[in-house]
Image (cartoon, grey):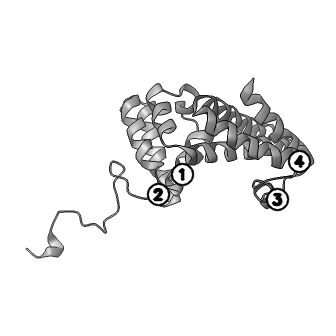
Amino acid sequence: MTDQDSTVPSETDPQTPDSVQAPSFQQAMEIAAIWLQQWDQEEISDEVIADRVGELVESRDGARGFFVISLAGDSALMDRLPEALVGKLRSCGEGVVDLTVRNLAMSAAMVVHHRKQADDLQAAGSERVNLRCTELLRQLEPHSVKERLETLLAAASNNQGSDVAFLERWGYDANQKTAIARAVDAIAD
């Protein structure tokens, strides 16, 4: 038997969903979709999905992929927010806070856009993402969340600070920026 015939996986073989190392954004979305389906079907526990998500969100692309699927998808994970998952996301720090705040802003702005286009279905989807972000931010580390939201609010309300470039890159208009400011204010309610 030659080395090529070996059944032992090499380091260059694609990663399986159970062992994740710095996946691409696309891979992270695919992995997250599988895990959320397993969780929804009660094939894995809250603790197992929390551990897996914790590994996935260690990289920026992994975190982006997870949040795209979990915030916008049909899985109930981000509606229920199991304690084990919240604990794991809290421990991941400012990267999770930053992505959640950005998703809060984008979803608030897209609600305005979709309503202007009379697309109620898409508006409802953006509202769901916004609500999920709001609830998650209320459970993440309060000091980090407050600082990050203040930065976003300064950009949305006063065109100041480091998030101005983020808002400009997406081309948000005054109505969308007002919606973003309202979404930030809703976190404290």
| Residue nearer the viewer, 149 or 65 | 149
The residue that appears at 63% across and 42% down in the rendered structure is 100
What residue would you read off at disc 4?
Answer: 158
Q: Nearer the viewer, mark 3 or mark 1?
A: 3
Is residue 113 visible from the viewing direction of this image?
A: no
Residue at numbered disc 1: 65
Which one is closest to the eye, mark 4 or mark 1? 4
Name which of mark 2 and mark 3 comes first in the sequence: 2
Compute the Cα span from label 4 to label 2: 38 Å
Q: Secondary structure at mark 2?
A: helix
Using the image, determine if residue 184 lies above or below residue 189: below
Residue 9 visible (yes or no): yes
Q: Quadrant of residue 14?
A: bottom left
Distance CA(mark 4)–CA(mark 1): 31 Å
The dot on residue 154 is: none
Apparent side of residue 27 relative to residue 114 in the rendered image (left or right) = left
Determine the secondary structure under disc 1.
Answer: helix
Name the outermost residue toward the top.
189
Residue 184 coordinates in the image, percent (x, y):
76, 36
Q: CA distance from mark 2 to mark 3?
A: 29 Å
Tag 1–tag 2 contact (CB < 8 Å): yes
The x, y position of residue 168, in whole percent, is 82, 59
Image coordinates for residue 169, horizontal then vertical, percent: 78, 61
